[in-house]
Amino acid sequence: MISTLFTGSTGHELKAAAYEYARSKAQISRWENNVDVIVIGGEDQTAIKIEQIRQLKDEIFILPIQHEHKVCLIEQADLMTLPAQNALLKVLEEPPEHVLIMLLSERVQFLLPTIQSRCSVIRVSSRSENMVESDAFWTREGIDQYLEIQKLKGRAEAQQWLTDRLGNLHRNWIESSADMQTEERVRASLHALKLLERNVNVSLAMDWWIRHVV
């Protein structure tokens, strides 16, 4: 499974987002006393050392026992020493298919660029305005669409992506006899396209689309 980096908010909110993500992607909701959950770091640590990452590497290649996937959570990932980050990099390059690796960091500037580039990044806003707080987002469809949007490069790709989604929504609208929810999604997609045509920042336009469609 693809590794994921959560950033953009406080440690508590990052952890809450990671828990929900793991529940949706790996169907793991119980964290305490769970043999398929590995947690590294935490509030009582001042550094994450290479020995901890080496132990992690040994554990993640063991198949899960109670679930289909294992979950590895690295809290305050920016506390990893440089040797620890280099050791983790080798894992992120070819992670086992049965493992979901999640990194939490409020200070991504202390993470190697190569670490960041090998993760899908989910930016968690403050709880009052967090676009990933809704139950709809935490469906597999919502998460998959969010990750797709994160990979878009530039205005042209975003416009093409929205145009493709608009075509799918329009077909669903016709087949479902124009139900209200699909109609609202069509209107929201058209509005997002207009925002891009008006040179609104791509990230802002796509964030608006997620808030109104997912």
Image (spheres, grey):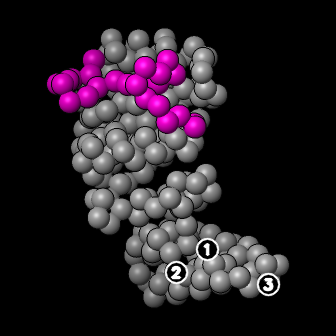
Locate residue 128 relative to residue 97 in the image: left or right.
left
Q: Which residue is drawn at 76% across and 75% down?
A: 172
- Which residue in the structure is indicated by mark 2? 192
Q: Which residue is drawn at 43% across and 29% down?
A: 31
| Image mark count | 3
Under circle 2, the secondary element is helix
- Which residue in the structure is indicated by mark 1? 162
Alpha-carbon span between mark 2 and mark 3: 24 Å
Under circle 1, the secondary element is helix
Which circle, 3 or 1, is nearer the viewer? 3
Q: Can residue 160 be seen in this view?
A: no
Q: Which sits in the foreground, 29 or 182?
A: 29
Q: Where is residue 106 in the image (x, y as percent from the top left)?
A: 25, 45
For badge 2, the amino acid type reads Ala
**Image disc number at residue 177:** 3
Query: Tag 3 or tag 2, which sits nearer the N-term?
Result: 3
Under circle 3, the secondary element is loop
Q: In which quadrant of the rendered view does residue 200 lie?
A: bottom left
**Image disc number at residue 189:** none
Instruction: Say if 103 sits above or below 58 in the image.
Output: below
**Residues shaded magenta:** 26-49
Q: Residue at x 29, y 64 (%)?
A: 128
Residue extending farthest to the right is 175
Q: Position of residue 125 (x, y in %)?
A: 32, 59
Q: In which quadrant of the rendered view does residue 99 lie?
A: top right
Residue 132 is one of the magenta-drawn residues: no
For badge 3, the amino acid type reads Ser
Alpha-carbon span between mark 1 and mark 2: 8 Å
Instruction: Say if 103 sits above or below 192 in the image.
Output: above
